[in-house]
């Protein structure tokens, strides 16, 4: 009987050792993924690049700071009320959704990228015209 209890005790020790190793492995893996997520979140998605929206009489001018971005890896998507900018550089990714203060005509937008600054010009959508009565 004593031999049986020692055997059970050894098996229990082995089981608990394996469980402990597996918990450690899973914890390290989860922490590594959490760290990667946090680095990505705080470096690009949450804080995003600095930007400014300047309203001019006939257009909106959106200026976005994306230093180090590769011009060929800048993607801009526009709708009537929103502009989305995604860009990548050698060591950073950028993402910014910008809600616009008025309707624009995204199909007529123009953009330039110089010295780490992206500028997008979006013509305002006309709200209608006054019709003269004759």
Image: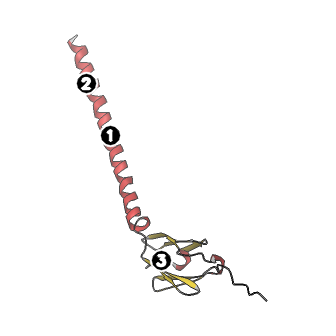
The answer to whether mark 3 and mark 1 are in CB contact below 8 A is: no
Q: How many marks?
A: 3
Q: How far apart, in angstroms, are the residues tagged by discs 3 and 2?
A: 59 Å
Which quarter of the rendered picture does the N terminus lie within? top left
Q: Position of residue 45 (x, y in %)?
A: 44, 65
**Circle number at residue 23:** 1
Please indicate whether residue 34 sits to the left or right of residue 102 in the image: left
Is 25 positioned to the left or the right of 63 in the image? left
Picture residue at 41% right of the left edge, 63% below the top: 40
Whichever of callouts 3 and 1 sits on the residue coming sooner in the sequence is 1
Q: Position of residue 19 (x, y in %)?
A: 32, 34
| Nearer-the-camera pick, 17 or 125 | 125
Tell me the mark number nearer the camera, choosing from 3 and 2.
3
- Drawn side of residue 38 relative to residue 130, left or right: left
Give the residue at the far right of this rendering: 134
Q: Earlier in the sequence, mark 3 or mark 2?
A: 2
Q: Which residue is mark 2?
A: 10
Residue at coordinates 57% horizontally, 84% vertically from top-left? 59
From the viewer's perspective, is the residue at label 3 or at label 1 nearer? 3
**Under tag 3, what secondary structure?**
loop
| Residue occupying the point 28% across, 34% down | 17
The residue furthest top is: 1
Q: Position of residue 83 (x, y in %)?
A: 55, 72
Quarter occupied by residue 127: bottom right
Marks 3/1: CA distance? 40 Å
Q: Distance between the Cα atoms at labels 1 and 2?
A: 20 Å
């Amino acid at each position: 009987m004593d031999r049986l209890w020692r055997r059970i005790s050894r098996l229990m020790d082995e089981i608990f050792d394996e469980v402990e190793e597996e918990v450690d492995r899973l914890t390290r893996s989860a922490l590594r993924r959490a760290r990667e997520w946090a680095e990505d979140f705080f470096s690009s998605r949450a804080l995003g690049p600095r930007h400014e929206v300047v309203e001019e009489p006939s257009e909106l001018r959106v200026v976005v700071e994306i230093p180090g971005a590769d011009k060929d890896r800048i993607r801009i998507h526009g709708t009537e009320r929103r502009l989305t900018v995604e860009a990548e550089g050698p060591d950073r990714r950028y993402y910014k959704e910008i809600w616009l203060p008025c309707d624009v005509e995204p199909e007529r937008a123009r953009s330039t990228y110089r010295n780490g600054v992206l500028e997008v010009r979006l013509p305002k959508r006309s709200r209608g015209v006054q019709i003269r009565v004759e």
